[in-house]
Image: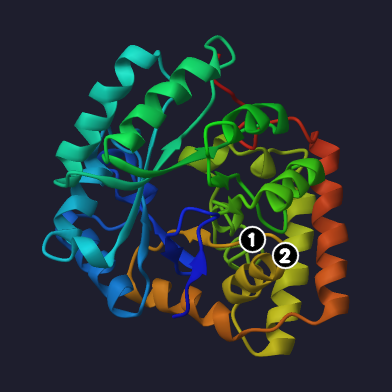
Amino acid sequence: MHTVPLGDSGIQVTPLCLGSWNMAGDDGWGPDDDGRAVALIHHALATGCNFVDTARGYGGGHAETVVGKAIKGRRDQVVVATKMLHCPPARVSAELEASLACLDTDYVDLYICHWPRPSLPLEPFFEALVAEREAGRIRAIGVSNFSLHQLEIARQYGVVSLQPPMSILWRFPDAAREFCRQHGIAITPYSPLAQGLLTGRFSSGEGTVSGIRSRNRLFSEDILPDSLAVAQQVDQLAARLGCTSSQAALAWLLRTPGISSVTVGASRPQQWDDNLGCLEVEIPDEDYADLDRAGRAIWERIGTEEAMWGWKPN
C-alpha cells in the first residue's frame, strides 16, 4: 500500500487507517474477544496498512490496550493515533500517561483532541500538548470534530490533521476544508461508511437500527428513507463497476480533494480485505458528482452545524 504525508508532520501514513472503536470490549461491536481483535490488527498490518486509530474513550482505554498488544514488537512499523477529550491543561500529562500505559509505548505518533468543549479555552490546552510534543511523548498533534473557528485556533499550535465525520452522506463545511488545504492540514475522516449505511446491508433490508446507530442522525426516522435512497444509488454504482458497495463508498471519499487517509473499522479480516479493495476502484466523474449532490442534500437538510450524533460536549 502506498503512503501519503500526514500534513506537514513528516509522518507518512497509508490511505486506509484501521479504526478500533469496535474493539472497546463491552462498549464495542467488533471481534468478540481481544485475541481476535489483535489478530485483525496483525492482518491489516500484513496487508501494508501502517496506520491505526484508537482513543482513551473507547471502552475507557480497552481499545488502546488491544492496540498496545498488537503493536508489541513492531512499534516502529506502526503510526499510532490516539485521542483524548479536551480537558484542563493540568490534566493533559496524566491523560497522556494513561494512554501510553495502555498502549505500552513511550510515545504517540498522533495525539488527537477528540471533542472540543466550548466551556474550556483551547489555548492553554494546546500549550500543554505542545509541551508534551517538545518532550518527545507526542510526535504530532491532531484534532477531531472541530469547527472552522476552533481549527483556526488549533493551527496556531502546529496541528497537522483534522478528523471529521465524513462520507457520501455526511460532510463538513467547505470553508473548513479549504482552510485545511491552505495550511497543509491532513483530513482523515471517520465513519466513511456511515456506520454501515453505505455497505449494502441496510439498503437490502438486512441491517437493524440499534445501539450506537440509534443516536446517529442519518438513522433518525425523518432522515433514514433519504439515506437509504442514496445508499441504493451506491449499490447500483457498485454493481456497474463490479465492486462492493463499501468499496465504492470508500473510493468516492478517497477521490475527494484534500482527503489524506480514511479511518475505517472492520470486525474480521475478510471485511478489512474488502475495504482494501477500494484502492483499485475508480469512480467516474459523473457518478462522483451525482453522489456528491445527493449526499450533500441530506447533510444540508439536517443542518450543517449539527453533530452527526445529535450531541456535542459542553
Give the labeled residue for mark 2.
256
Label 2 SS: loop
Classify 10 as above or below 219: below
- Which residue appears farthest toward the front when viewing the image? 134
Residue 140 pos. (x, y %): 41, 45
Q: Residue at x 51, y 29 (%)?
A: 115
The residue nearer to you, when weighing 203 against 38, is 38
Residue 298 at x, y percent in the picture: 81, 47
Query: Disc 1 on helix, strand or loop?
Result: loop
Identify the residue position indicated by label 1 in the image.
259
Asked where in the image residue 164 lies, by quadrant, the reply is top right
The residue under the point 35% across, 37% down is 133
Is 289 on the left-hand or right-hand side of 188? right
Q: Position of residue 252 (x, y in %)?
A: 69, 70
Residue furthest to the top in view is 119
- 216 shown above or below 257: above
Q: Pointer 2 and pointer 1: residues touching (CB < 8 Å)?
A: yes
10 Å crowding of disc 1: few (<14), some (14-19), many (20+)? some
Question: Is residue 184 among what the camera can see?
Answer: yes
